[in-house]
Image: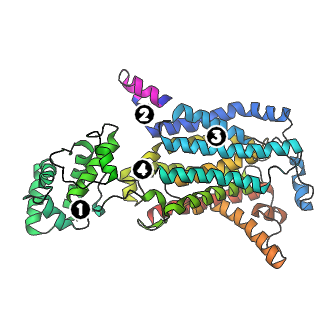
Amino acid sequence: MFYHLATWLEPYYSAFNVFSYHTVRAGAAAVTAFAVSLIIGPKVIAWLRMLKVGQYIKQEHVADLHALHKGKAGTPTMGGMLIILSTLFTCLLWSRLSNRLVVLAMLMLVVLGTLGFIDDYIKLRRKHNQGLSAKAKSVGQILAGILLGIYLTYNPITVSSTNLAERDVVNWPGFVSSLAPPHRGELAEGKAAVWAKLPAPLQAQLSEAAATGKVGGELASETVHELNILLDESEIYNAKVWSAALLNGEGKRLLKDGPPRAGQWEHSRLNRMLLEAAYPQYIVRSERNLHTKVAVPSFKEFYIPMGALYVLFVVILIFSSSNAVNLTDGLDGLAIGASIISLLVYTGIAYVVSRVDWSNYLFLTYVPEASELTVFGAAMLGSGLGFLWYNSHPAEVFMGDTGSLALGGAIGTMALLTKQELLLILVGGLFVMEAGSVVLQVASFKLRGKRIFRMAPLHHHFELKGWSESKVIIRFWILAILFALMSLATLKLR
């Protein structure tokens, strides 16, 4: 709302232009979501108490664990509604809803939150700790993943680059010789048009370098800089000059109604494609099909091509992330604290990959549409901190499956939409540990008849070893922070 209001009022009051910056709106979203959570928190908790939506503690659990947790019986659950409502309200205020990625993230938050709500509601009606069957819950998660996977496969995220990087030129001496006159070939007029728009001092340096065949690093850097100014600010296209340009479907779509007027990105993208068409043997074509490829952390531009299997990959990621957060939600503040750390990392990543300069520098996939995910991530952060205010030990409210499934789905969705899917294994390293402990425990018992841990998930194992609940929570948060720091290190170590 504030973004659209700012665009409407900016011609009359220039101060409103500040709300067009997604960084400003992200900061405002975090504060707003936190404030909303604090304000409505007591009312939501009182309402849940009135409905007698209390947590049931299984007496058939390990006796020692039941003794530790029996005092939590009756604590209101389904508190995840507080996170969802605060986030949605904040996004309506501060995000640009014309951005489809933020809408997708909000939809996944609601869909998985609704699935968790149904599970919690059944527990309430049955007055038992068993809600939806594992099969029914899995079907809901898988269906949500399938729908998201199909959408991302057939409505790809824009990951094409507009600006030129030095590494995009595979042969600098050859490129400089072709860039400087005389220009020959089918697109000679197009090359001449590009040359004419370069500054005269640079033209002199390029002509000299073309004659000697020696291209220094400074010249390459300056050439890239000037070409990027040209791509961003100049209209290179002219139907007569570029009639022989071999453009793919994307280029033809951009040219369908003449020079694009939809926005700066489309304008720059067409200019980049024309430059690639003019110098195909020297400039690497920017990728267009990265939406079904998965980047491998710590490797420069190394991708695993998924093709149609990308839908299955999305299903596995959403299913795993939502279940992992759900399994971690067993102690006061544990799951929400770890989720806040993961969300903080992906909010930062969303900002980085939406900037062409930073993404090029770090060799990350450039996702211009991800800018608004910083607002969504910041709203989730604020909501999470607000919920932690009431969920910290001793908890006044539990998130229930309403919150854990929604949080896991939101984190997984941000990993997908920022094109840093595999990094989630490290970003959410604590969740991987918790879910892995359950898998290992079940596998070991079925195969060997013996348990590895005193109890799974892992946090219960340490509780039964004598660690206090607060000590387990704080130490697991420390692990989550370490995993987050390691994940950020991979962005630079490539």
Q: Are marks 4 and 3 in contact (CB under 8 Å)?
A: no
Q: Nearer the viewer, residue 219 or 420?
A: 420
Say which amino acid is labelled 4.
Thr
The residues bearing labels 2 and 1 have C-alpha atoms spaced at a distance of 37 Å
Q: CA distance from mark 4 to mark 3?
A: 29 Å
Look at the numbered disc 4 and give the secondary structure of its residue.
loop
Task: Return the disc, 2 or 4, that comes first in the chain's sequence.
Answer: 2
Q: Amino acid at mark 3?
A: Ser
Left/right placement of residue 396 relative to residue 313 reads right
Relative vertical location of residue 364 with respect to residue 443 in this rendering, above or below: above
Q: Is residue 203 above or below residue 432?
A: above
Residue 209 vertical position relative to residue 274 in the rendered view, above or below: below
Instruction: Determine which of the numbered discs, if any, sits on residue 383 in the image.
Output: 3
**Rendered residue at 42%/57% (across/down):** 365
Which numbered marker is on residue 20?
Answer: 2
* Residue 158 numbered tag: 4
Residue linked to disc 1: 280
> Where does the magenta region start and end?
3-16
User: Is residue 115 highlighted in magenta?
Assistant: no
Colour mode? rainbow
Earlier along the polypeptide chain: callout 2 or callout 1?
2
Residue 449 location, x and y as percent? 85, 77
Q: Position of residue 445 (x, y in %)?
A: 82, 73
User: Which amino acid type is shown beneath numbered disc 2?
Assistant: Ser
Q: Quadrant of residue 177?
A: bottom left
Is 13 covered by the magenta stretch?
yes
Question: Could you tell me which residue is drawn at 44 percent across and 51 percent down?
Answer: 352
| Residue 244 appears left or right of 249 | left
Callout 4: 10 Å neighbours few (<14), some, many (20+)? some
Residue 146 on image: x %, y %: 60, 54
